């Protein structure tokens, strides 16, 4: 089922409200944290204005996502919606190896598996952060290259026009 813009505009995404310090202009910032700290935001002098601006920007961004064929994520569940328990199916040999390692480390199988998951989760988050930084640096590098190219073109044009102006005689064309 293809979901339309109206569906996404009526889905209850979590909204964060942040007071903007007076030395930065004052007012309020409203944002959808699920889309990044500054992914979809709105601002205003009052909380209501910030939310209204956020809703307008959300509509524009979601329209753009749908037009480009990007997937719009459903709202994230609150922590309260999770029990902290889930069942994992695994091969018998892995279950055995995990149990032996837990015993060797003097902890329960549950505690051992939780530790392994937490360690891997953290390294996965670091890898995601590094990947995001790499992409941002790559993008900045491309923009610097474009600016340098445009700057070089401007210098060539400037050199040509100044040399033509400084010539006392123009070449004769036969």
Image (cartoon, rainbow, N blue to C red):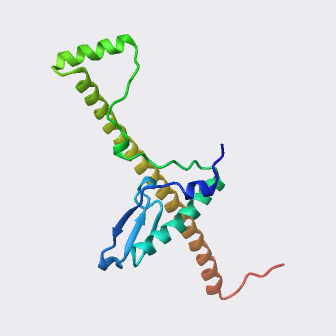
Residue 100 shown left or right of residue 165 in the figure: left
User: Which of the two residues, 145 or 113, is positioned nearer the viewer here?
Assistant: 113
Residue drawn at (60%, 82%) of the image: 162
- Occupied quadrant, residue 115: top left
Of the 4 image quadrants, the one containing the N terminus is top right
Q: Is residue 126 above or below residue 112?
A: below
Of the 4 image quadrants, the one containing the C terminus is bottom right
Residue drawn at (59%, 50%) of the image: 70
Residue drawn at (38%, 42%) of the image: 81
- Place of residue 173 in the rendered image (x, y in percent of width and height, measured from the top left): 81, 79
Q: Residue furthest left?
A: 106
Residue drawn at (34%, 42%) of the image: 126
User: Which of the two residues, 136 or 8, is positioned nearer the viewer here?
Assistant: 8
- Place of residue 136 in the rendered image (x, y in percent of width and height, measured from the top left): 45, 54
- Place of residue 67 in the rendered image (x, y in percent of width and height, measured from the top left): 66, 55
User: Which of the two residues, 149 or 1, is positioned nearer the viewer here?
Assistant: 1
């Amino acid at each position: 089922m293809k979901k339309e813009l109206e569906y996404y505009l009526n889905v209850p995404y979590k909204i964060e409200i942040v007071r903007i310090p007076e030395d930065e202009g004052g007012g309020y910032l409203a944002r959808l944290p699920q889309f990044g700290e500054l992914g979809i935001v709105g601002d205003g002098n009052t909380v209501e204005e910030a939310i209204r601006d956020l809703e307008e920007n959300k509509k524009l961004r979601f329209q753009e996502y749908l037009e480009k064929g990007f997937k719009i994520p459903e709202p994230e569940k609150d922590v309260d919606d999770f029990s902290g328990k889930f069942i994992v199916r695994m091969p018998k040999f892995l279950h055995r190896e995990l149990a032996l390692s837990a015993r060797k480390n003097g902890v329960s199988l549950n505690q051992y598996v939780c530790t392994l998951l937490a360690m891997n989760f953290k390294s996965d988050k670091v890898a995601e952060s590094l990947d995001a930084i790499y992409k941002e640096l790559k993008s900045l590098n491309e923009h610097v290259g474009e600016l340098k190219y445009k700057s070089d073109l401007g210098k060539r044009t400037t050199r040509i026009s100044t040399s033509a102006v400084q010539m006392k005689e123009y070449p004769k064309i036969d």
